[in-house]
Amino acid sequence: MNKPITYLLLPLLSIAVGSLSGCTIDWGRENRPAIAPSPTVDQSENQSARSLAPTADDTNFVVAVVEKVQPAVVQINTSRTVRTQVPSLPEEFNDPFFRRFFGDRFPTQTQERVVRGIGSGFIINSQGQILTNAHVVSDADTVTVTFSDGRTVDGKVLGKDPVTDIAVVQIPGDNLPVVELANSDSVRPGQWAIAIGNPLGLQETVTVGVVSATERSASALGISDGRIGFIQTDAAINPGNSGGPLLNARGQVIGINTAIIGGAQGIGFAIPINTAQRIAQEIISTGKAEHPYLGIEMLPITPELKQQINSAPNSDIRIEADRGLLIARVVPNSPAARAGLRAGDVIQSVGNRPVTNADELIQTLEQNGVGNNLPIEVLRNGQAVQVTVRPEPLPPLAKP
């Protein structure tokens, strides 16, 4: 993947505080963009047109979806203070002559700047719980939520899961408008997709397209240890859409807009709502989400890999299988090590499902969960071996 994945949080201009001073740009009269005057309209000829109500051509399923969902879609505003240490020097000490003798042995002072960001979210229950992306609220000192009618309230992050990029924000209130959730397992390529959010800070923006693909693998997007099969859409999404809903033609949420491929057009990705809802419930209940962990590093079997390993001199490993996942390393004291898995084993099935790539294994592992026995079939020296692993919670920064 040559083009990097770009998450859709919209960073705003940093505002300096403390020892830094803000500044304001004045375009000046000569630098202001030229605005063409509106054309004159003959009032007598157009008087009747003013009173015309919208025709059937002006309303469609998209209008109905927007009117249904928009009250429950919100703008999430965040701010965080970034502090840096800078030398506190008289101007004359900036001369290289003085630095030659004194080096960096000078007192420092703290400078602060406030970094602000904008994302999107949607209310999933009437008690004020909002679903959004983890990267929208990551490291935020303050979170505020703005409704489509202009109301703004303070929000509190209940928890976030950086592995799946899901977060839940709590706001005060009851009997709030909520979205309706679809079953994302039934989403099919070609069906309508509608995105609502705040791209580039433009609140309540609506874009329309189709579902381009489902179960788009994380590895295809350059995301290591991806635990999500993404929904791909060509509905236009941009920075600021992060955390906003992707909807079907009935106005039900099928996914959470989360990323785009930098430099591409019409290629955006959403987290399926079934996955997001499961993670959100864990966060609401416990403040965090757990992910199952085996403790192996693996490679998919290819003809090239098979030939390379089998022809290597003094190799203790010989691959007989034409498909599966080669275990390249087993982490010591991991669930896989305790179950007896070894480097050189070739995984054929996990949870009684055949696997040929890491994404299939990880998704099956996620569905199995933490602490539940997971049967794994491997080929070891050409012989089928059955192993039962009991996955544990994923340690920070660990691989499957």
Image (cartoon, rainbow, N blue to C red):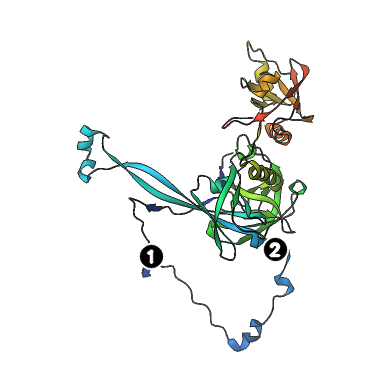
Front-most of residues 392 and 2: 392
Residue 32 in which image quadrant: bottom left
Q: Quadrant of the C terminus?
A: top right
**Which numbered disc covers residue 68?**
2
* Percent coordinates x, y for residue 387 in the rendering: 75, 21
Front-most of residues 169 and 341: 169
The disc, 2 or 1, on the residue closer to the chain's N-terminal end is 1
**Which numbered disc covers residue 27?**
1
Where is 241 relative to 134, above or below?
Answer: below
Q: Report the Cα–Cα distance between label 2 and label 1.
A: 40 Å
Label 1, residues with CA under 10 Å away: few <14, some 14-19, many ≥20: few
User: On the rendered structure, is 105 left or right of 54?
Assistant: left
Q: Quadrant of the N terminus?
A: top right
Front-most of residues 368 and 128: 128
* Percent coordinates x, y for residue 372 in the rendering: 73, 30
**Can residue 267 be seen in the rendering of this structure?**
no
Query: Who's the residue at 25% across and 33% down the image?
Result: 103
Query: Who's the residue at 73% across and 36% down the image?
Result: 367
* Percent coordinates x, y for residue 328 in the rendering: 64, 22
User: On the rendered structure, is 97 left or right of 168?
Assistant: left
Query: Who's the residue at 70% across and 63% down the image?
Result: 68
Q: Secondary structure at mark 2?
A: helix
